[in-house]
Amino acid sequence: MKKLTYKVIEDEQTLVYEEVYNSKNEVIYYKDYQANPHAEKKITFNDLGLLVEEIDLSDGNELNRLELIYDKNGRNTERNFFFGTDLYEKVITEYSESGHVKTTYQDGEEVNRLVTETKGKNYVSKFYQNEKLIESQFSEYDTVNKCNEIKIYDGDNNLIVIRKETYNHADEVVNIEDVNENGNLLSEHTYEIEKGLTLKEVHRDFRAGESEYNISREYDFNKNLIKMEVRAANNHLIEFYLSTYDDKNRLAEEKGVSNGSFNAIYGSYTNGEEYHFIHKYEN
């Protein structure tokens, strides 16, 4: 199946995107007609539906390529990123019964390493950059109150942030608070979730003066997102998004105003402007 996306300006439709799907409804080809020259992406999945390769092309020439390798449990063990034909970055993840080690190499040199040890829902993570410890995280989960406390230290073992995550009965995060070493609230994020769907979010940040924005979402009976609004604390509308679906439950139309935050592809061309897209399908 092929999906063709048209941008509507003053009732005139212009083809801007093309996507091709396989029999499993996975996107295996993408083309951006707004890029100059046109940008293409070829995507390959394995039999388990796991991404194994992405190739970015421009004017028919390969720009970069991403390759991923998995173990028998479906865990990613190797990630290779090529610029042209040259291997630029390799990420190796080694798993054990007590956790995992993820090491990133660029041009053959180790640039960072993440070492994580787990015990139940508790974990300790240490992040190294150029073989120097720059951050540690110690996480303890409270099963009675369904909350997780994460203490974050810098490379000199100075406490930076204490993060508290609170979960609902479905183990979904409903509140996140960050406080500093003195107990002062740095930021707070709350989520209203119903039947696995996030209906509302409130985000408050106190680090550079107080800022707040609120996100509300509406869904149809197929659990498709059909409306989203982002508003400031004074109720000023920052973003909005509307969508409709056809009788085959396929995305048919999108309208809104984006500041580039909620959709990286559309946002790059619609930053701060109204947009209107119509999607058409070919078998």
Image: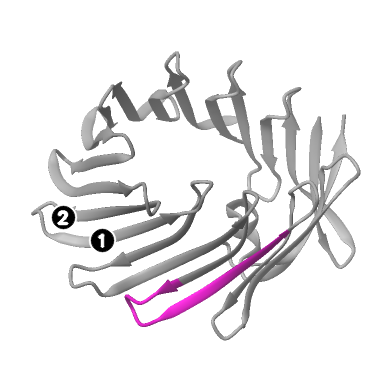
Q: Quadrant of the C terminus?
A: top right
Disc 2 is placed on an element classified as strand
> Nearest the camera: 220 or 121?
121
In the rendered view, tell whether residue 192 sits above or below residue 210: above
The reply to whether residue 277 is in sight is no
Q: Which label lies toward us, 1 or 2?
A: 1
Q: Nearer the viewer, residue 36 or 111?
A: 111
Counting from the top left corner in percent of width and height, residue 151 is at 23, 55
Q: Amino acid at mark 1?
A: Ile
Give the vertical position of 167 relative to 122 (above or below). Answer: below
Do the residues bearing badges 1 and 2 touch, measured as CB atoms within 8 Å? Answer: no
Residue labelled with disc 1 = 162
Q: Quadrant of residue 18?
A: top right
In the image, is 245 to the left or to the right of 30? right
Which amino acid type corresponds to the residue marked 2 in the rendered image?
Asp
Among the two numbered marks 1 and 2 on one chain, the one whose residue lies closer to the N terminus? 2
Q: Nearer the viewer, residue 160 or 280?
A: 160
Q: In the rendered structure, which segment of residues is drawn in magenta?
A: 204-218
- The answer to whether any part of residue 246 appears in the image is yes
Q: Is residue 207 magenta-colored?
A: yes
* Marks 1/2: CA–CA distance: 12 Å
Residue 78 at x, y percent in the picture? 38, 23
Whether residue 159 is in magenta: the answer is no
> At 73% across and 37% down in the image, what residue appears?
19
Identify the residue at horizontal 19%, vertical 43% (top origin): 129
